[in-house]
Amino acid sequence: MPLKETDPEIHSLIGKELQRQQDCIDLIASENYTPSSVLEATGSVLTNKYSEGYPGKRYYGGNEFIDAVETLAIERAKKLFGADHANVQPHSGSTANYCAYSALMEPGETLMGMELSQGGHLTHGSPVNFSGKAYKVASYSVDRNTEMLDYDQIRKQAMEQKPKVIVCGYTAYPRTVHFERFREIADACGAYLLADISHIAGLIAGGAHPSPSKYADVITTTTHKTLRGPRGAIIMCKADFAQKVDKAVFPGAQGGPLDHVTAAKAVCFHNAMRPDFREYAHQVVKNAKALADELNSQGLRLVSGGTDNHMVLVDLTSLGITGKDAQTVLERAGIICNRNTIPYDTQKPFVASGIRLGTPAMTTRGMKESEMKETASLLLKALRNRDSADALSSIKKEATALCSRFPIYGDYRV
Ligand SMILES: *Cc1c(COP(=O)(O)O)cnc(C)c1O
């Protein structure tokens, strides 16, 4: 029986969510619209299978086709990112980091990552997260003036604190990461280098950001952000770490893999190898620059002054509104984003002084630079007219009209 009949409540909510996605401008830097080929694989009968272990070494029978699916996903991931080894089973980016750390270090050893409030991820050593509880943490920051990575300072800190693992790659950093500089630092202080490319994986795959594959010992990434695949993650590594990484994932952290998601990851990597994905990745960056330029020219201060990637971090201090309130106002105007701390923020993380904007989702819809200008204007108009319910609802109509010119899924229905 179709979902519509067995569970009309859930069916209707999924339909409403699809309509919301269609009608809103999505500027969440970590979101994207996955193609229907990925939805189809994710919704497939592969969800029925148990396959603890790895291709050719399973604990359950009946894995002939699952082995072929996982092998394809592994081979494609290796080819796409130029890796010696890939584990495609991690359920999420956080789990992938958990596994990578346990492959590289023991509890109590030192992990060096970017501070959460400066742009690092929760799993890079935040005290409320397993990473901050299991490991000794040495957090680094961006430079107070440039708001960019200061490699000399990080090197100095690494030499003093002698971490076992250095993490580079961030959640809220709008600039290029120079992986070769991190390699030098890791070599100088005797650390392993972990590149967490969750945010920029699609840009790397499409040639719009340098790749860490030559430099990092281990690479983790989600598959659902710029890479535009299903919700999940993978770990890649140099051959020397392959066994440790595989053991850390299964049996170390997980039981059975999500075979339907593995299939969807394989589809995602296949898509990302095509020439149109390269074009997409470069357009994401062009769109972020266009968005940044327009916000800048209309008087907003951008963290680090601009962007090199898919993301723009806006300091709202001059408008006299917090990130939290801006997020709410923008949602009423049909523009979805998230509040974000800015480096050396004076507000608490739950309130924050900034918003984080990204172009991966709107670029997938086909929007280009001129629509980014339009989006920036709508966003500023909403923030400046935040006390007028009428203004916000009329901006929402404009946002929906803009979106209607760029359908996400054509004829796709829930
Ligand atoms: C999103 C993200 C993660 C975590 O991914 P989840 O799938 O949400 O657990 C880890 N690291 C970085 C840098 C991220 O941006």
Image: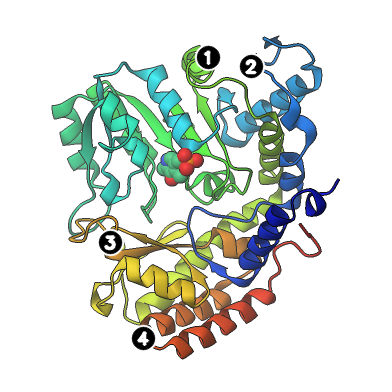
Q: Looking at the image, in which quadrant does ligand 1 appear?
A: top left
Label placed on residue 387: 4
Mark 2 to mark 3: distance in Å? 42 Å
**Residue 316 relative to residue 390: left or right:** left
Q: Point out the tag, 2 or 3, that comes first from the N-terminus.
A: 2
Callout 4: helix, strand or loop? loop
* Residue depth check, mark 1 versus mark 4: number of the one nearer the observer: 4
Residue 412, picture quadrant: bottom right
- Residue labelled with disc 3: 352
Q: Point out the tag, 3 or 1, that comes first from the N-terminus.
A: 1
Mark 4 to mark 2: distance in Å? 55 Å
- Mark 1 Cα-neighbour bin, 10 Å: few <14, some 14–19, many ≥20: few
Q: Amino acid at mark 1?
A: Pro
Residue 77, picture quadrant: top right
Label placed on residue 52: 2
Q: Point out the tag, 1 or 4, that comes first from the N-terminus.
A: 1
**Between 297 and 10, which is closer to the camera in this rendering?**
10
Mark 1 to mark 4: distance in Å? 54 Å
Return the x and y of residue 141 as percentages of the image width and height.
22, 46
**Between 325 and 158, which is closer to the camera in this rendering?**
325
**Residue 272 relative to residue 323: left or right:** right
**Residue 384 relative to residue 264: left or right:** left
272, above or below 379, in the image: above
**Decide: marks 3, 4 in contact (CB < 8 A)?**
no
Q: Point out the tag, 3 or 4, that comes first from the N-terminus.
A: 3
Q: Amino acid at mark 3?
A: Ala
Q: Is residue 197 visible?
A: no
Mark 3 to mark 1: distance in Å? 39 Å
Callout 3: helix, strand or loop? loop
**Residue 233 relative to residue 264: left or right:** left
- Residue labelled with disc 1: 251
Q: Amino acid at mark 4?
A: Asp
